[in-house]
Each structure stands twice: as structure tokens, then as C-alpha cells.
Image (cartoon, coloured by chain):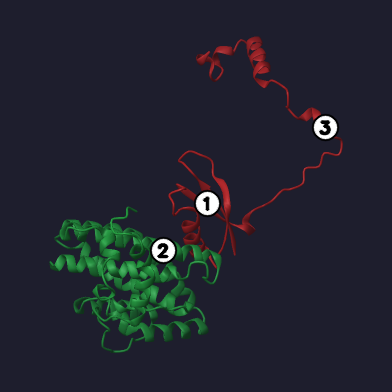
Chain colours: A green, B red
């Protein structure tokens, strides 16, 4: 597999798994407006995953659906940050913001790529991610505005920071850290990243659920 | 805060009331309205109006039942035509060239 396809699958797996995780709030978010918004963001992420899988599928001679659902749980390249099941709102918002912030750094580097197909897709994705960032940033403003909010956000970010670092390659981490520290007005712990390729137990559980419909259908079913 | 949302389905069409969103401020309201009334490309524009900014009028007294003020059953078109004929301005009237 080429380095390019490997990269496309990493990006697509991040978006797919995060989309599924975010959709775990559908119907049970703290209030109706947020429920709709967060579910819509989840659907967008899955749409990005599809576009990325389609590009990878051309080179691999397969389909986006096969890449999304026919691989085993250990074959996913998603960062451990998006694998975690976090049914607690402060951590959900912290993960959402950490991911969007890291993704912004990553998309900026992809937009500058010589590979025009990849750069074009990154630019297209970034135009939608801009609204996800707007949503995440508003929550950060809101949480930083009160003592309770700040302490809950700080706790969640500290806990998730090693995972957040793992979203990016070594080279992009310093920029991500600087951006996050400036925004939060605090230093973040100097820790080892939880890298891509580590599979949290929660991923296997999600995989069971995510692929169950496809696995239950006879081979060759049309969707 | 409650924001009333008005949406425009196509360019040039009037904005119509779509519903409302509850949000802590204008920034959140924008995101929520975008996701609720725009994510399926069902709107080309939205207006967000804080409910407090609306001035509602809901009383229209008609103590004497002045039905003659209503225009039901009264052909304005025919009356206008007559009046224009009298004044000799029929050919200047809007739509005259279509006839």
C-alpha cells in the first residue's frame, strides 16, 4: 500500500469513527438544539470519511463501503482519541475541540500538498470543518467563562491530551500544542502521545455495532 | 435567549417563519439555526431575530362591525379599468401591453 493510501485511510478512519462516536449523543444530548447540531456534525464527519475512502478505493480497486465496513477492527488506522467512548458532556466537548484543532493543523498541511487531488479534497473538507470549529470554539468560550466550566474543561483536556497528540505526526505536534496552549491560557502536560495503531478495547465494541448490518446481509447485497 | 428563525427557500422569495431556537447567545444561535434549518440545503438565507426584539400587535378592535371596509367580492381590477378609461390612462397602466 502506498504512503498516500495509508494517509487517506488514517484520515478517513478518524472521521468515520469520530462520526460514530459523536452520533452516540443523538437523542440524548443535554438539550434539543445541541442534539440536532451535534448529530449533524457527526453526519458531516461520516460524509468526509466517505469522500476519503472513495479516493483510497480507486487505488486499492475496491469501494468506500468495503473499506469502511469489511475490514477487521485491528485494521483501522484511527487515532485512539476518536475510539474512546465518552458518554460525558465535558469530555465530549474537550475531545471535539481537541480533534478539530488538531485537524485544522493537519488539513492546512494537506492543502499545501503537491498532490492536487488530496489538496483539493482537504480544502473541500476544511470548508465544512470551519463550522465544526466555530461550534467547538463557542463551547470553549462558554466553558472558560465560569470557574466550574474551566475546571471541568481543564480536567477533561488534561486527561485527553496524550490521545490528542496521537492524532498528528511528530512534525505537526508543536504547532498543535502552541495553538491549544494559547487558546486555553495554560500549559499542557509534556507526555508521550498515544499513537495511531493502538486499538482501544472500545473500538472492537464499536466495530461490532457499526458493521453488524453489513455483516448480516448476504454477500453481494446492493445498498 | 429565544431566537425566532425566518428562512428563505429560494432567492427572491419572502422569508417565512420557520420556528425558533433556544441558545445562550447569538453565536450559538447561528450554529443551531444553521444545523436545524439549513443542513439539508432547504434554505438559501436565514434571519435570526431575538424574540425580545419583536414587537407584536395582536388586537384589532372592530366594535361597529365595519364590514364595508373589507374588499371581499369587490372586483378591484374591473373598477380600476373603468377609472383608468375615464381618466384616459389605460395604456399607461402596468400590464397594459399584455392585453
Pointer 1 residue: B47
Using the numbered discs, state the Cα–Cα distance from disc 1 to disc 3 in whole angstroms.
Answer: 37 Å
Q: Nearer the viewer, residue A209 or A28?
A: A209
Using the numbered discs, state the Cα–Cα distance from disc 2 to disc 1 in whole angstroms.
Answer: 22 Å
Q: What is the chain identity of the residue bearing mark 1?
A: B
All told, the count of numbered labels is 3
Quadrant position of residue A155: bottom left
- Do badges 2 and 1 share one subunit? no
Q: In terms of secondary structure, where does tag 2 sit?
A: helix
Using the numbered discs, state the Cα–Cα distance from disc 2 to disc 3 in whole angstroms.
Answer: 55 Å
Q: In terms of secondary structure, where does tag 3 sit?
A: loop
Q: Where is residue B52 in the image (x, y as percent from the top left)?
A: 64, 59
Pointer 3 residue: B66
Q: How crowded is mark 3: few (under 14 residues within 10 Å), some or many (20 or more)?
A: few
Pointer 2 residue: A41
Q: Where is residue B20 in the image (x, y as percent from the top left)?
A: 58, 57
Q: What is the chain identity of the residue bearing mark 3?
A: B
Asked if residue A122 can be seen in this view, the reply is no
Q: Where is residue A112 in the image (x, y as percent from the top left)?
A: 19, 63
Amino acid at each position: 500500500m502506498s504512503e498516500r493510501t495509508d494517509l487517506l485511510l488514517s484520515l478517513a478512519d478518524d472521521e468515520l469513527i469520530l462520526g460514530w462516536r459523536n452520533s452516540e449523543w443523538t437523542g440524548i444530548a443535554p438539550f434539543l438544539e445541541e442534539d440536532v447540531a451535534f448529530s449533524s456534525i457527526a453526519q458531516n464527519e461520516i460524509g468526509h470519511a466517505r469522500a476519503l475512502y472513495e479516493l483510497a478505493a480507486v487505488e486499492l480497486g475496491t469501494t468506500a463501503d468495503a473499506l469502511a465496513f469489511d475490514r477487521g477492527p485491528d485494521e483501522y488506522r484511527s487515532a485512539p482519541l476518536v475510539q474512546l467512548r465518552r458518554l460525558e458532556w465535558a469530555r465530549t466537548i474537550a475531545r471535539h475541540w481537541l480533534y478539530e484543532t488538531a485537524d485544522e493543523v493537519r488539513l492546512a498541511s494537506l492543502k499545501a500538498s503537491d498532490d492536487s487531488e488530496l489538496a483539493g479534497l482537504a480544502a473541500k473538507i476544511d470548508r465544512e470543518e470551519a463550522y465544526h470549529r466555530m461550534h467547538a470554539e463557542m463551547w470553549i468560550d462558554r466553558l472558560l467563562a465560569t470557574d466550574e466550566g474551566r475546571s471541568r474543561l481543564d480536567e477533561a483536556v488534561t486527561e485527553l491530551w496524550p490521545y490528542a497528540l496521537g492524532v498528528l505526526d511528530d512534525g505537526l505536534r508543536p504547532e498543535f500544542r502552541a495553538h491549544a496552549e494559547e487558546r486555553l491560557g495554560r500549559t499542557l502536560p509534556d507526555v508521550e502521545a498515544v499513537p495511531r495503531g493502538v486499538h482501544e478495547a472500545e473500538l472492537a465494541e464499536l466495530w461490532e455495532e457499526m458493521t453488524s448490518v453489513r455483516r448480516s446481509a448476504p454477500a453481494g447485497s446492493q445498498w | 435567549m429565544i431566537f425566532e428563525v425566518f428562512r428563505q427557500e429560494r432567492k427572491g422569495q419572502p422569508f417565512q417563519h420557520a420556528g425558533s431556537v433556544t441558545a445562550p447567545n447569538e453565536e450559538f444561535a447561528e450554529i443551531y439555526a444553521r444545523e436545524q434549518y439549513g443542513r439539508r440545503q432547504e434554505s438559501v438565507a436565514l434571519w435570526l431575530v431575538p424574540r425580545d426584539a419583536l414587537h407584536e400587535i395582536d388586537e384589532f378592535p372592530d366594535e361597529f362591525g365595519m364590514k364595508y371596509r373589507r374588499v371581499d367580492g369587490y372586483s378591484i381590477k374591473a373598477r380600476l379599468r373603468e377609472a383608468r378609461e375615464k381618466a384616459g390612462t389605460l395604456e399607461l397602466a402596468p400590464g397594459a401591453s399584455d392585453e
